[in-house]
Image (cartoon, rainbow, N blue to C red):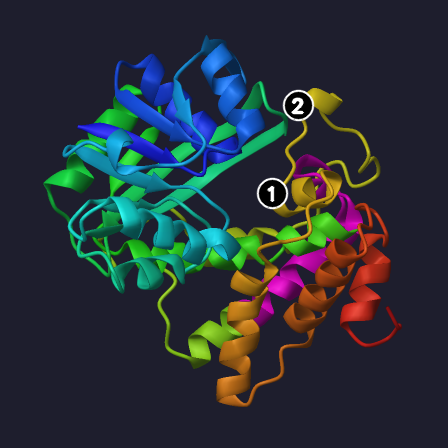
């Protein structure tokens, strides 16, 4: 088996790099700057370790670079999934195993339209890659399952290899319920990008916690109304207890008086959408995160002002190359509640 990391950015380099270090065969498909860094050797930095790893990297796939034993792990942003699938269609047969190790819940459905063996991947990992040759990683939990549900030998082998690479990996026959839970958590990627708050700063700021709670509660209410499960059935493995985690936001932070105090700059955790704005990218995943809640709300006739306005603001910031930090949490909360104009 060889793993093809398609769209190797921060997640792809972190996962692929640790797979290489553990002895797996890996081919990275990445943008030119990152492909060059992979070939030359790049660093993966975790809390208590740092490794340097090099690998085989290409900037695009062709039939000559594929192999019969390939398992494709897609790590592109959701807005790039359709283009990625089109390229993969050109070089692989429909029965190639394809793992969507991505945020959002629409990628697996899109992949299943042209591929017969599709897997969902849940990442409870934060990665930062502001320079091509350095990826920092926090967290290590990954869950893999067949789409739309179930397990098979490919899922079990991948989990075994991820575990050997150092991840807390598990198989999950109800992977999409857990991915909906992750979507609820990711609704605040936009909140972080707009305010410029990294995760550790948010956890210590009572105003930011109140904002995040309101955004999550709106999302959970819509999913409950749509009868979409956000947790596996009782008794099944549950990698992310989103309702329990959301309730924790009601508890005041322990260091609420000093929200700016946190880890050094190189140890701060930046959500991917915040990184996109910092790097001046013109696209973002809000349509595939907050947009899912907005579309379901429209179908159900239920207003979704928090997620709708977050999506509008982050899109304007992307279009106009506005850097993170344009509003404080209190200012953004007031805008989302309609008490202040953006």
* Residue in the picture at 52% in, 77% down: 295
Write down the region rendered in magenta.
195-219
Helix, strand or loop status at disc 1: helix
Q: Is residue 205 above or below residue 36?
A: below
Q: Mark 1 or mark 2, which is nearer the start of the sequence?
A: 2
Q: Is residue 135 visible?
A: yes
Q: Is residue 231 above or below residue 337?
A: above
Q: In the shown orientation, is residue 242 left or right of residue 216?
A: left
Name, please, the residue furthest toward the left: 153
Q: Residues within 10 Å of mark 2 (few under 14, many from 20)?
A: some
Which of the two residues, 208 or 7, is positioned nearer the viewer here?
Answer: 7
**Residue 111 appears in which quarter of the rendering?**
bottom left
User: Residues at badges 2 and 1 in contact (C-beta under 8 Å)?
Assistant: no
Q: CA distance from mark 2 to mark 1?
A: 15 Å
* Residue in the picture at 37% in, 46% down: 122
Q: Which mark is residue 272?
A: 1
Q: In the shown orientation, is residue 251 left or right of residue 142?
A: right
Q: Which mark is residue 3?
A: none
Q: Position of residue 90 (x, y in %)?
A: 29, 49
Judged by depth in the image, the label closer to the viewer, 2 or 1, is 1
Judging by the rendered image, the residue that carries numbered circle 2 is 267
Q: Position of residue 206 (x, y in %)?
A: 76, 49
Residue 201 counted in the magenta span: yes
Which of the two residues, 38 or 15, is positioned nearer the viewer here?
Answer: 38
């Amino acid at each position: 088996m060889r793993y093809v990391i398609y769209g190797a950015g921060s997640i792809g380099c972190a996962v692929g790099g640790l797979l290489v270090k553990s002895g797996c065969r890996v081919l990275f498909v990445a943008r030119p700057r990152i492909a060059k860094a992979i070939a030359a050797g790049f660093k993966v930095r975790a809390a208590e370790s740092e490794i340097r790893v090099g690998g085989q990297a290409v900037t695009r796939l062709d039939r000559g670079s594929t192999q019969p034993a390939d398992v494709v792990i897609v790590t592109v942003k959701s807005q790039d999934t359709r283009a990625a699938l089109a390229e993969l269609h050109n070089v692989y047969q429909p029965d190639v195993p394809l793992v969507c190790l991505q945020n959002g819940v629409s990628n697996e459905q899109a992949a299943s339209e042209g591929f017969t063996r599709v897997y969902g991947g849940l990442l409870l990992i934060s990665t930062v890659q502001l320079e091509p040759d350095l990826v920092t990683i926090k967290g290590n939990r990954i869950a893999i399952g067949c789409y739309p549900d179930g397990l098979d030998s490919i899922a079990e082998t991948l989990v075994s290899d991820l575990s050997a690479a150092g991840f807390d990996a598990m198989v999950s026959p109800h992977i999409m319920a857990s991915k909906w839970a992750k979507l609820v958590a990711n609704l605040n990627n936009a909140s972080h990008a707009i305010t410029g708050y990294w995760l550790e700063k948010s956890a210590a700021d009572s105003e930011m916690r109140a904002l995040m709670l309101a955004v999550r509660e709106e999302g959970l209410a819509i999913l409950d109304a749509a009868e979409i499960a956000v947790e596996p059935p009782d008794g099944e493995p549950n990698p992310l207890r989103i309702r329990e985690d959301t309730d924790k936001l009601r508890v005041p932070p322990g260091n609420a008086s000093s929200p700016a105090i946190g880890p050094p700059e190189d140890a701060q955790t930046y959500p991917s959408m915040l990184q996109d704005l910092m790097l001046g990218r013109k696209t973002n995943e809000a349509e595939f995160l907050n947009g899912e809640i907005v579309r379901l709300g429209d179908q159900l006739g239920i207003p979704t002002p928090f997620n709708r306005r977050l999506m509008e603001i982050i899109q304007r910031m992307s279009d106009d190359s506005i850097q993170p930090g344009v509003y404080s949490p209190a200012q953004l909360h007031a805008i989302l509640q309609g008490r202040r104009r953006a």
